[in-house]
Image (cartoon, rainbow, N blue to C red):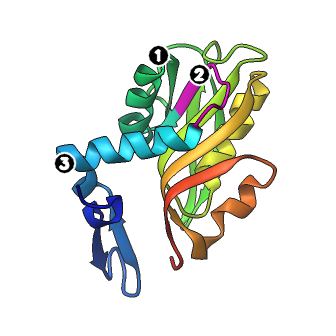
Amino acid sequence: MKKLEEYVRTIPDFPEKGIMFRDVTSVIQDADGLSLAIDSMDKLIGDTDYDVVVGPESRGFIFGVPIAYKNHKSFVPVRKKGKLPCETIEAEYALEYGTAVIEMHKDSIKPGQKVVIIDDLIATGGTIEAIIGMVEKLGGIVVKIVFLMELEGLKGRDKLAGYSVESVIKYPGN
């Protein structure tokens, strides 16, 4: 079996010149790559005691649901504003050009529940920082955050200081 890094397709100059885009679709469209990604992320969770997996739309769903299923945990989706049908809480976070709003159901996390957050990539860390704020507002405790890939040059990990953060693959640039 190949190493996980070998499944990641790198596309130079996308979406703009100088950017090396790390494409996760090349990982998930290969059965061995997908299996290796899920198993590698799950291994980083290790023996962490947790109750629920939280993942942001959409790639957090791709990796979070199988990990939750594998460990017989529940999964809580975090979605773009206006996509969830019940009462929600929301958080705004900064994008490169402007802001975005994400939501989760108000009843999705119970006070005291231990939460693992799963996503495909950490870049600037804004999305996960917003998710942490919502989880904690609902009384949850973030015990681990796991990413498939990390762009270390963008220093997103700095926004998550004080939390246990793991990445399967680390790229030194941005």
Picture residue at 35% right of the left edge, 37% below the top: 62
Question: Residue shown at 29%/41% (left/top)?
Answer: 35
The local crowd at label 2, few if under 14, some if 14 to 19, many if 20 or more residues have their Cα within 10 Å, is many
Rendered location of residue 2, percent (x, y): 25, 60
Q: Is residue 113 on the magenta stretch?
A: no
* Amino acid at dot 3: Gln
Label located before the other in sequence (3 or 2): 3
Mark 2 — residue?
Answer: 52
In this rendering, is residue 149 above or below 28?
Answer: below
Residue 21 position (above or below residue 4) = below
Dots 3, 2 in contact, CB < 8 A? no
Q: Residues within 10 Å of mark 1 (few under 14, many from 20)?
A: few
N-terminal of the pair, mark 2 or mark 1, is 2
In the depicted view, which residue is nearer to us: 62 or 80? 62
Give whichever of 151, 3 is nearer the camera.
3
Instruction: Give residue 70's quadrant in the image.
Output: top left
**Does dot 1 land on a helix, a strand or a loop?**
loop
Q: Which residues are magenta?
A: 46-54
Give the mark nearer the N terminus: 1 vs 3. 3
Q: Which residue is mark 1?
A: 85
Q: Give the mark count.
A: 3
Whether residue 58 is visible, yes or no, is no
Q: Are marks 2 and 1 in contact (CB under 8 Å)?
A: no
